[in-house]
Amino acid sequence: MNWDQIQGNWKEMKGKVIESWGKLTEDELTEAQGDREQFEGLLQQKYGKSKEEAREAVDRWLADV
C-alpha cells in the first residue's frame, strides 16, 4: 500500500495506526489528516525518533499493511 491510499482512507486507517503506535491518540491522528509529514512528526515527538527513523518506521509499516 502506498501513502496516497492511506491518506485517502485515513478515517479507516486510524485504527490500524493506533494498533501499531499506541502512544498516538485519535485526536492527534485526526489533526494530522493523513499528512505523512505531520504523522512522522508525531512519531518523532511521541517515540523520540529522528526524522530518518520515523520515515523508515512508516515505510516498514506501509509494507505490512
Image (tube, rainbow, N blue to C red):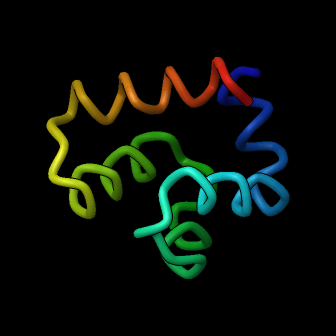
Quadrant placement of the C terminus: top right
Residue in the image at 64% along x and 18% along y: 63
Q: State left or right for residue 12 relative to residue 63.
A: right
Position in image of residue 11 (x %, y %): 80, 62
Q: State left or right for residue 30 relative to residue 25.
A: right
Q: State left or right for residue 10 relative to residue 63.
A: right
Asked if 23 appears above or below 33 in the picture, the reply is below
Position in image of residue 20 (x %, y %): 56, 50
Q: Nearer the viewer, residue 47 or 33?
A: 47
Quadrant placement of the N terminus: top right
Residue in the image at 51% along x and 22% along y: 60
Name of the residue lying farthest toward the bottom: 27
Asked if 37 appears above or below 51 in the picture, the reply is below
Asked if 42 appears above or below 36 in the picture, the reply is below
Picture quadrant of residue 40 = top left
Position in image of residue 15 (x %, y %): 73, 62
Residue in the image at 20% along x and 34% along y: 51
Position in image of residue 32 (x %, y %): 52, 62
Q: How many marks?
A: 0
